[in-house]
Amino acid sequence: MEIYILTLFPEMVTDALSHSIVGRAAASGKLRIHALNIRDYSTDAHKKVDDYPYGGGAGMVMFCQPIYDCVNAAKEMSGGDAPVIYMSPQGERFDQGIAKELSGNQSIILLCGHYEGIDERVIEEVVDRQISIGDYVLTGGELAAMVVADAVARLVPGVLHNDQSAAGESFENDLLEYPQYTRPRVWRDREVPEILLSGDHAKVDAWRYEQSVERTKRLRPDLLREG
């Protein structure tokens, strides 16, 4: 899978996504992450990418031309079929279901705004979907894009050493993940649940499911209502 992140700060993206599971997947060729600098596509002599908003107001707005050309470049690099996703607080709330959906694409393009956002006309022209990671304001779309990239990358076959790992994580089947334990068996008088030491996989699976349901009821009952 290929993930194209269109940003004014490519180093911010590439540095953060070059570590841990995503970094190893990229190094092994299972995943490719491209950070395109929107400023490189500006036709302005000074590589300007923003201007004052019509109608007045605080801040600057990214104008259409460099974004449009950068998106087209990413589409050409990806073969032309990649959906363009704008990271925006106005978008649909990102969740595991959307991550699964996006992971089914050969490539995706994540567009990061900055300042007071981007000209509405380029959104209308090139954006297929808008996604938000929560109801709060960030300085730019880079952090949101990295969240989406990380969540999607984990679902790409071969990225996790054990593909069953993704199936048991939080938000699968609208449930939080069950508690996890490792050595030592006893730590500060707290013991690992006996069932996990039994070797009976059917009983362990049943216990884990019960724990997931109980934990979801206690910590995120909204997931059960939505499910």
Image (cartoon, rainbow, N blue to C red):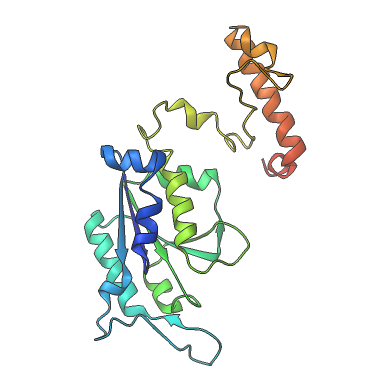
Residue 55 pos. (x, y %): 53, 92
Front one among 14 and 167: 14
Q: Looking at the image, which residue is at 48% across and 59% down?
A: 143
Residue 26 pos. (x, y %): 30, 43
Res 219 → quadrant:
top right
Vertical order, 211 against 54 (above or below): above
Q: In this image, 11 relative to 94: left or right?
A: left
Q: In this image, 227 relative to 4: left or right?
A: right
Q: Looking at the image, which residue is at 44% across and 61% down?
A: 142
Front one among 136 and 20: 20
Vertical order, 70 against 192 (above or below): below
Q: Which residue appears farthest toward the bottom when viewing the image?
A: 55
Res 220 → quadrant:
top right
Quadrant in the picture for the N terminus: top left
Is there any visible trace of residue 89 in the rendered image?
A: yes
Is there any visible trace of residue 83 in the rendered image?
A: no
Q: Which residue appears farthest toward the front when viewing the image?
A: 188
Residue 131 pos. (x, y %): 51, 59
Residue 91 pos. (x, y %): 54, 62
Vertical order, 71 against 100 (above or below): below
Q: How many marks?
A: 0
Q: Looking at the image, which residue is at 74% across and 30% down?
A: 214
Quadrant in the picture for the C terminus: top right
